[in-house]
Amino acid sequence: MSLLQYFLSNTVIKAKCGHMVEKKYVNVHDGLCRKCHSNFSYIIDLVSNYGEDALVQYWYAMILTRLSSGENEQESICLIEHLIEYYQRQLVMVPSKEKYIKKMLYMLNSLQKPFDIKSLQ
């Protein structure tokens, strides 16, 4: 394989999360970069091993901590967007968990678009 063939077969593109990654990886991992896919896979494993309540506690604490500290704000925003997409698909695919999924979507959307308590007064 020539250097040009190797380069073309390992083309780097922008994943749907906005990060740069090899095209082959994006095609196999639902359009996500390595880091976002790893974060997403960890969350799926957490639910399967410890249940839905563990997931709520994990993501809420992790995302709030990152957003409030200003660290990795873009990664946290990216993760929230992926989770919203995932749970919107799950709402259609798993109607038996509609109540749980709607609760997750509500919390994720509230993190993505927080409201100002003063505006309610």
Image: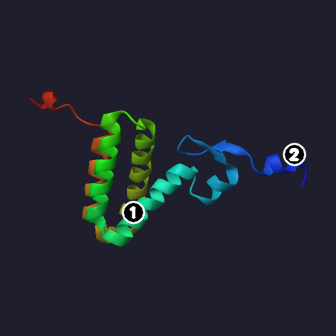
Q: Which residue is mark 1?
A: 90
> Mark on residue 4?
2
* Cα separation between marks 1 and 2: 41 Å
The vertical placement of 75 against 95, above or below, is above
Residue nearest the observer in this picture, 114 or 1: 1
Q: Position of residue 90 (x, y in %)?
A: 39, 63
Q: Position of residue 99 (x, y in %)?
A: 24, 63
Give the residue displayed 47% in from the left and 61% down from the top.
Answer: 41
Q: Which quadrant does the C terminus fall into?
A: top left
| Residue 32 visible in this rendered orientation of the protein | no
Tell me the kind of residue under disc 2: Leu
The vertical placement of 116 against 93, above or below, is above
Tell me the kind of residue under disc 1: Gln
Which quadrant holds residue 86? bottom left
| Residue 53 visible in this rendered orientation of the protein | yes
- Residue 25 is left or right of residue 109, and the answer is right
Nearer mark to the viewer, of 1 and 2:
2
Give the residue displayed 87% in from the left and 47% down from the top.
Answer: 3
